[in-house]
Amino acid sequence: MSYDMNPEFRRQLWLGFSPTRLVVLPLLLLACFAAAFMSASDHTAQALAYTGAALFAVLAWGMGTLAVGTSVMEELTDRTWDQQRMSAMQPWAMTWGKLGGASAYGWYGGMLCLLVAVPAAVVSGHASNVLQITLAAILCGLFLQALLIAVNLQLLKTSGAVARRGGVWVLVVLVLQIVTPLFGMGAEGGTVIWWGQPFANVNFGLASMALFAGCALVAAWRSMAEVLAVRQMPWGWPALALLCTGYLGGFAATHRMATLGLVGLAVCAMLTYLALLSEPQLRPLWQRVATRTASGQWRAALLQVPRWPTTLLLAVPFAVICTVALREPQATPWPGMALVALHPVAFVLLMVRDCALALFLAFAVKNKRAVAAFLLLMLVLYGVLPWLVGATVGNPLLGLVQPLLTQSKLSVVIAAAHAVLALVLLRWRWRASAP
């Protein structure tokens, strides 16, 4: 029985490996380890372990991640991406072919480093949790690589230059925020309380990194499907919101209902605005959604729906949870919660207003900078206008422009008025821009 290797994986291996590179990298690593060995007068095993860990980070996290992030961008430069899109490969095959093949050389060097670092750590007396930390380092590399290819594929829909710049900056931020806590996972005796259950630091960090890596792989796969024009049901974005809410909400020691609602509402808002800004809001796309919905083709309509409406709808139950939790005196430690109990509902209505205004700007025939115009409008609505009204008129009318600065029930009424006005404008623009 013959087995056909993934053509994209094979192509990336041919691009990344050569006989010279296969020989040069082990020789360079050997020279580095020899220098570390001779530089350490004593504790040579510990020096080799630290050197191997540092080189692993450079090769697997640095070189491998950058190679994966630029794999699509290089094809755009070489004008071979259209051929890839026209191939018969499925999104998952294309994803793991690029992910595994482009990063293979970095992992090749990283594994060579681990072959020295792990035994040296055991010999130096640091055997405890070595295997867990090694597995966590591998999972961290997989997470970085999968997330970067997902980010670049998303930014690819707007501009290749933006994707190239954005991918590098995402890598820098992730390395600064993730790699440093990873080295502290091996602290013995520490525990993490999550959903009322104690977990050892190492075990919890390892499980968290496995969860993050799995989410990044799913994100890369679904992003590849979007770029290859393979339509999928819009379950990924709300699933990510629920997963993030459950993970972050588990750290709350008390008032879990209120915390879960607030975290869920914040996560849904963040993902809604992120998708709203990163996805092109084209009128023909929404015309297809409207046409399929009018004809009763619900599945076909869902396949066309962008990501942001899913988390906007998911924000509604979280707002209800917040309102219920804030109305109960024993649920929150702060006095006067009844005055702001309905603010989560008002916040969701303002999200509806903002999304309607974003579509209003995007559907304009001559507006080529809809994202910039939307950001400027948000700056005016949330910053400049409340500041101006507060400085000139005073607090009595401040709630008319910023409903969240008024009391509970009034904030919902004013926010609903804002949302209705934005929807009326959107309806007018929809009719005016009809072909």
Image (cartoon, helix red, strand yellow):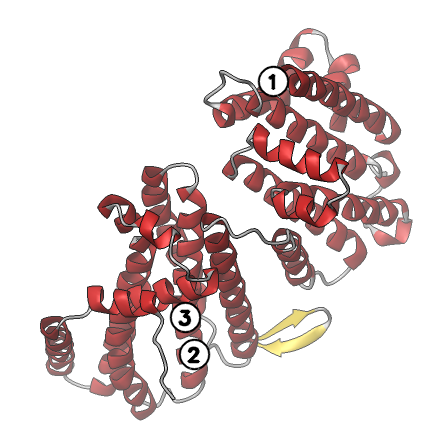
Q: Identify the residue at image location x=26%, y=65%.
A: 11
Q: Amino acid at mark 2?
A: Leu
Residue 217 position within the rendered picture, expressed as x and y whole percent measured from the top left: 49, 64
Residue found at the very far top of the displayed protein: 392
Find numbered disc 1 in the image and state the secondary structure of the residue it sits on: loop
Q: Nearer the viewer, residue 147 or 339?
A: 147
Residue identifier under label 3: 183
Q: Say which quarter of the image contains residue 7.
A: bottom left
**Residue 398 shown left or right of residue 125 in the figure:** right
Classify 305 as above or below 331: above
Residue identifier under label 2: 135
**Residue 307 shown left or right of residue 101 in the figure:** right
Q: Nearer the viewer, residue 388 or 276?
A: 276
Find numbered disc 2 in the image and state the secondary structure of the residue it sits on: helix
* Residue 433 image label: 1
Q: Nearer the viewer, residue 324 or 3?
A: 3
Question: Disc 3 and disc 1: Cα gap in Å?
Answer: 55 Å
Question: Disc 2 and disc 3: Cα gap in Å?
Answer: 12 Å
Q: Identify the residue at image location x=68%, y=12%.
A: 389
Classify 352 as above or below 422: below
Quadrant in which the C terminus is drawn: top right
Q: Say which quarter of the image contains residue 87.
A: bottom left
Classify 284 as above or below 216: above
Quadrant in which the N terminus is drawn: bottom left
Q: Nearer the viewer, mark 3 or mark 1?
A: 1
Badge 1 density bin: few <14, some 14–19, many ≥20, Cα 10 Å: few
Q: Nearer the viewer, residue 35 or 91?
A: 91
Residue 311 appears in view: no
Residue 57 position within the rendered picture, expressed as x and y whole percent measured from the top left: 30, 68
Q: Nearer the viewer, mark 2 or mark 3?
A: 2
